[in-house]
Each structure stands twice: as structure tokens, then as C-alpha cells.
């Protein structure tokens, strides 16, 4: 059986989490566990970035340094921006 503990949060945070748990039909503790499991630690993010960079290096066949990766443009973010602009233009709300 899992060991349990207590965490302290503000009443506002507790009430909000309790409301979300009720809406999802789960106990508050289960909601907190779900939320915690969905969040990556800095170490996990760094490991995923390193693994992704290894794959990119292998697929492209170039030895790209981490510094070069860090300076490279965020291609996915740029694609999202272009797509959003196209949607705004299609709706006639371009800024």
C-alpha cells in the first residue's frame, strides 16, 4: 500500500483543486497525484532534450553542438505563429 503524507496549500488552492477533482469525478489525492505525474522535473526535461538532440544528429548526420541547437530558431513556434496568422487572415482579423 502506498505511503501517504500531508501537504499544505492555501485554502484557495485547496478549494480549487477540490472543485476540479469533483468535476473529474476523482478523489482530491488522486487528482494531485495525476497533476504531479504530468509535470516534468528539470532533470527529466534535460534528459529528453539530450535524447532528442541525439536523434536529430543521427538523422541529419551532422555533429551539431548543443550551443548551435540553443542558437537555432524555434521552428515549431514559428510554424505555430504562421498558422495562427493564416487563421487570422482567413477570418479577416489580421493584426
Image: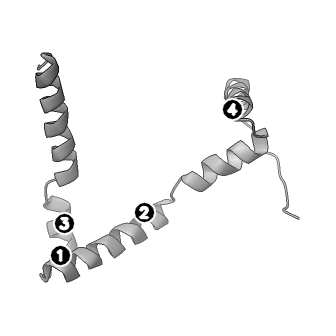
Q: In the rendered image, is residue 74 in sight?
A: no
Residue matched to label 4: 17
Please give the name of the residue rendered at 69% of the width and 32% of the height, measured from the top-left corner.
17
Residue matched to label 1: 65
In three-dimensional space, the C-alpha distance between marks 2 and 1, rounded to whole angstroms, equals 18 Å
Please give the name of the residue rendered at 14% of the width and 54% of the height, measured from the top-left corner.
73
Could you say whether the residue bearing mark 3 is in a helix, strand or loop?
helix
The picture places residue 72, in percent across and down from the top left corner, at 13, 60
Q: In this view, does 80 lie above or below 33?
A: above
Give left or right: position of 22 versus 74. Answer: right
Nearer the observer: mark 4 or 3; the answer is 4
Q: In the rendered image, is residue 34 in sight?
A: yes
Q: Between disc 2 and disc 1, whose residue precedes?
A: 2
Give the position of the N terminus as an image quadrant.
bottom right
Residue matched to label 3: 69
Are circles 4 and 2 on residues that touch, CB within 8 Å? Answer: no
Q: Between disc 1 and disc 4, whose residue precedes?
A: 4
Could you say whether the residue bearing mark 4 is in a helix, strand or loop?
helix
Are circles 2 and 3 on residues that touch, CB within 8 Å? Answer: no
Q: In this view, does 53 lie above or below 2?
A: below
Are circles 1 and 3 on residues that touch, CB within 8 Å? Answer: yes
Amino acid at each position: 500500500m502506498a505511503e501517504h503524507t500531508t501537504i499544505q496549500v492555501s485554502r484557495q488552492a485547496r478549494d480549487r483543486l477540490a472543485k476540479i477533482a469533483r468535476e473529474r469525478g476523482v478523489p482530491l489525492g488522486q487528482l494531485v497525484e495525476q497533476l504531479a505525474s504530468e509535470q516534468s522535473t528539470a532533470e527529466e526535461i534535460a534528459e529528453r532534450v539530450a535524447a532528442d538532440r541525439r536523434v536529430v544528429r543521427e538523422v541529419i548526420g551532422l555533429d551539431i553542438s548543443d550551443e548551435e541547437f540553443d542558437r537555432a530558431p524555434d521552428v515549431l513556434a514559428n510554424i505555430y505563429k504562421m498558422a495562427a496568422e493564416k487563421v487570422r487572415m482567413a477570418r479577416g482579423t489580421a493584426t
